[in-house]
Image: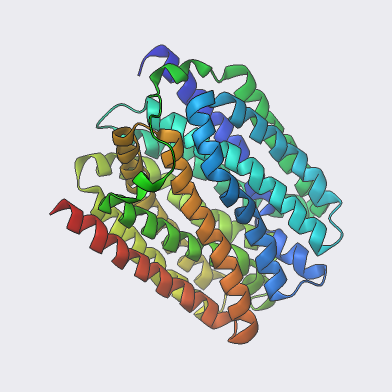
Amino acid sequence: MNDVQKKIFAALCMAIFSAMLGMGIVAPLLPIYAQHTGASGMAIGLVFASFSISRTFLLPLIGKLSDRKGRKIFITAGLLLLSLTSLGYVISASIPVLILTRTIQGIAAAMVIPIALAYMGEITPGGKEGTYMGIFNLFFYGGLAAGPILGGIVKDTFGINSSFYSMGAISFVGFLLALVFLSEKGREIRHTPTRTGYRHFFKPRRLKGIFTYRLCFSIGIGVTWAFLPIFGDNVLRLSSSRIGLLISLNILVATLLQTPFGRLADRFPKGWFVSLGGVMAACPLGLIPFTRNFAEIFLVNLLLGVAGGIAMPALTALVVEEGKKLGEMGSMMSIFVLFHSIGMIIGPLLAGVSEQTIGLTNTFLIGGAIGLAGVAGFGWAFFKAEV
């Protein structure tokens, strides 16, 4: 990397850390917050899904625009909007207002996450995709890991509104960092798109496997994030701090493994790391309803974190490789995040329906089965393409 790229790298890492820390603060609080307003299981699923629904509709447009107009304007505007949504949570006295706030937050996330990933992908040296994306993921997941435990502690100590205000303040810090330190000089690195539409992104068999995996993996994440707090609160009778710790543990372990497994992914076949991580994620997800105390669910979440640490650096590195081939990194990362968003829509909604019809236990089992199906789909498409 040259000096300009190093500056961009540092600014992106710190900005994304602030953004994910802010969003992570409210994640374990929302299901319980919604339940206390009288929300049913289906309504809780809709609260979670509304974030991803709005993000999903905007991702293709924002990806294309960022390839043409630059990255900084979207990243800074998104971070500022994230900080303002904290006020929406404070005044959310009903489910419709809470859904609206989550919808706006999804719009902001669509402007930050895929565009920051695209920026990182462009400045990553060839052959080092796993290493640099692993480092970036360290800040990405690090912020997400610290958020839930911080939010739980603040809520237990000062009340839930203080958690929302903390989210707004931290996201605003990220906005300032991006505004001051992020440079648009990175646009010199990018290629000018010559194609319109997205059909060509779905022709390579490797990409079909990657997108299938991302969708199924994200459905499992959606199930976990939406209903693990409910399981911890209703069944295990855990405090908000302990629930936040569980969510944080999962992400923290994955965070610590990003860099070492990113380096390994540059030395060994990336597809095997993706497959192994997928299997390791699906199995513990199915074990969640069989836990009976904090120690047992702590161990299950530890295994889920290890799975994410193994799979994600290799998966994002594969996406960077494909984005460089097509020369449309913003669009590529937007589609990659799009499938994550669709999974985060399906997961909570499916879990909400399942919880109301066949019980909370079966909800987690269904999530694990979908995860295994995603690994099978990835293996069939990805490894067959390499033959």
Instruction: Locate residue 58 relative to residue 129 in the image: left or right.
Output: right
Q: Residue furthest top?
A: 3
User: Where residue 152 sits in the image (x, y, percent)?
Assistant: 70, 55
Which residue is at 40% across, 23% downward?
Answer: 190
Using the rendered image of the protein, determine whether residue 259 is visible from the camera's viewpoint. Answer: yes
Q: Position of residue 78 (x, y in %)?
A: 65, 35
User: Observer-nearest residue: 217 or 293?
Assistant: 217
Residue toward you, 296 or 261: 261
- List x then y, in percent, for residue 28: 66, 58
Instruction: Decide: is 136 above or below 49.
Output: above
Quadrant location of residue 110? top right
Q: Locate the N terminus and report the quarter of the image it occupies.
A: top left
Q: Answer whether residue 130 is visible to the viewer in this image.
A: no
When asked about the image quadrant of residue 276, the answer is bottom left
Left or right position of 273 against 36: left
Q: Nearer the viewer, residue 197 or 338?
A: 197
Quarter of the image where the C terminus is located? bottom left
Q: Could you tell me residue 236's position as x and y percent?
A: 64, 76
Residue drawn 68% across the image and 73% down it: 42
Q: Residue furthest bottom?
A: 358
On screen, residue 54 above or below 34: above
Residue shown at 58% from the left, 73% from the top: 351
In depth, the one of 154 and 119 nearer the eye is: 119
